[in-house]
Image: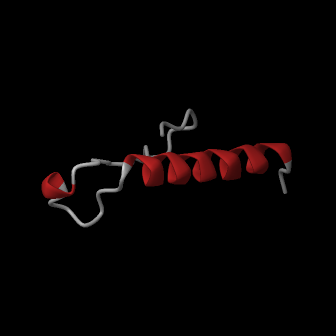
Protein backbone atom coordinates (compact mmCIF):
# COMPACT_ATOMS: atom_id res chain seq x y z
CA UNK A 1 0.00 0.00 0.00
CA UNK A 2 1.42 3.37 -1.04
CA UNK A 3 0.71 6.53 0.97
CA UNK A 4 0.44 9.87 -0.84
CA UNK A 5 1.64 11.79 2.23
CA UNK A 6 5.14 10.35 2.02
CA UNK A 7 4.88 7.65 4.69
CA UNK A 8 6.72 4.43 4.02
CA UNK A 9 4.78 1.98 1.86
CA UNK A 10 3.34 -1.17 3.40
CA UNK A 11 3.74 -4.38 1.42
CA UNK A 12 1.85 -7.62 1.82
CA UNK A 13 3.79 -10.62 0.54
CA UNK A 14 1.76 -13.67 -0.33
CA UNK A 15 2.17 -17.07 -1.91
CA UNK A 16 -0.46 -19.80 -1.97
CA UNK A 17 2.08 -22.59 -2.38
CA UNK A 18 3.18 -23.67 1.10
CA UNK A 19 6.40 -25.13 -0.32
CA UNK A 20 7.49 -21.65 -1.46
CA UNK A 21 6.69 -19.83 1.78
CA UNK A 22 10.24 -19.57 3.05
CA UNK A 23 9.61 -16.47 5.12
CA UNK A 24 7.16 -16.89 8.02
CA UNK A 25 5.72 -13.43 7.31
CA UNK A 26 4.52 -14.53 3.86
CA UNK A 27 0.74 -14.71 3.81
CA UNK A 28 -1.80 -16.60 1.78
CA UNK A 29 -3.52 -14.56 -0.91
CA UNK A 30 -6.71 -14.33 1.15
CA UNK A 31 -4.80 -13.20 4.28
CA UNK A 32 -3.00 -10.52 2.26
CA UNK A 33 -6.28 -9.23 0.84
CA UNK A 34 -7.86 -9.15 4.32
CA UNK A 35 -4.92 -7.28 5.88
CA UNK A 36 -4.66 -4.79 3.02
CA UNK A 37 -8.40 -4.15 3.13
CA UNK A 38 -8.36 -3.65 6.90
CA UNK A 39 -5.47 -1.18 6.63
CA UNK A 40 -7.19 0.71 3.80
CA UNK A 41 -10.42 0.97 5.82
CA UNK A 42 -8.51 2.21 8.89
CA UNK A 43 -6.78 4.87 6.79
CA UNK A 44 -10.08 5.95 5.24
CA UNK A 45 -11.62 6.22 8.72
CA UNK A 46 -8.77 8.52 9.74
CA UNK A 47 -9.58 10.80 6.81
CA UNK A 48 -13.31 10.76 7.56
CA UNK A 49 -12.86 11.46 11.28
CA UNK A 50 -9.83 13.75 11.78
CA UNK A 51 -9.04 14.54 15.39
Q: Residue at x 62, y 44 (%)?
A: 40
Could you say which is closer to the camera, residue 28 or residue 36?
A: 28
In the displayed structure, 6 sits above or below 32; it is above
Q: Nearer the viewer, residue 12 or 20?
A: 20
> Residue at coordinates 48% horizontally, 36% vertically from top-left?
2
Residue 32: x, y in percent? 44, 50
Q: Please, which residue is most extreme toward the bottom here? A: 24
- In the picture, measured across the screen, residue 50 lies left or right of residue 22, that is right
Residue at 59%, 51% (x, y): give it.
Answer: 39
The image quadrant of residue 22 is bottom left
Looking at the image, residue 13 sits to the left or right of residue 23; the answer is right
How many discs mark residues in the rendered view? 0
Horizontal side, residue 19 vs residue 44: left or right: left
51 or 45, nearer to the observer: 45
Q: Position of residue 45 (x, y in %)?
A: 77, 49
Q: What colour scheme governs how the chains and residues are painted in the rendered image of this protein?
A: secondary structure
Quadrant holding the C terminus? bottom right
Left-right relation of 34 to 13: right
**Which residue is at a point 29% across and 48% down the rendered structure image?**
16
Up the image or down, 51 lies above or below 44; here it is below
Amino acid sequence: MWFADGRKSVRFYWDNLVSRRLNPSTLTRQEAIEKATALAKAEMDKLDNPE
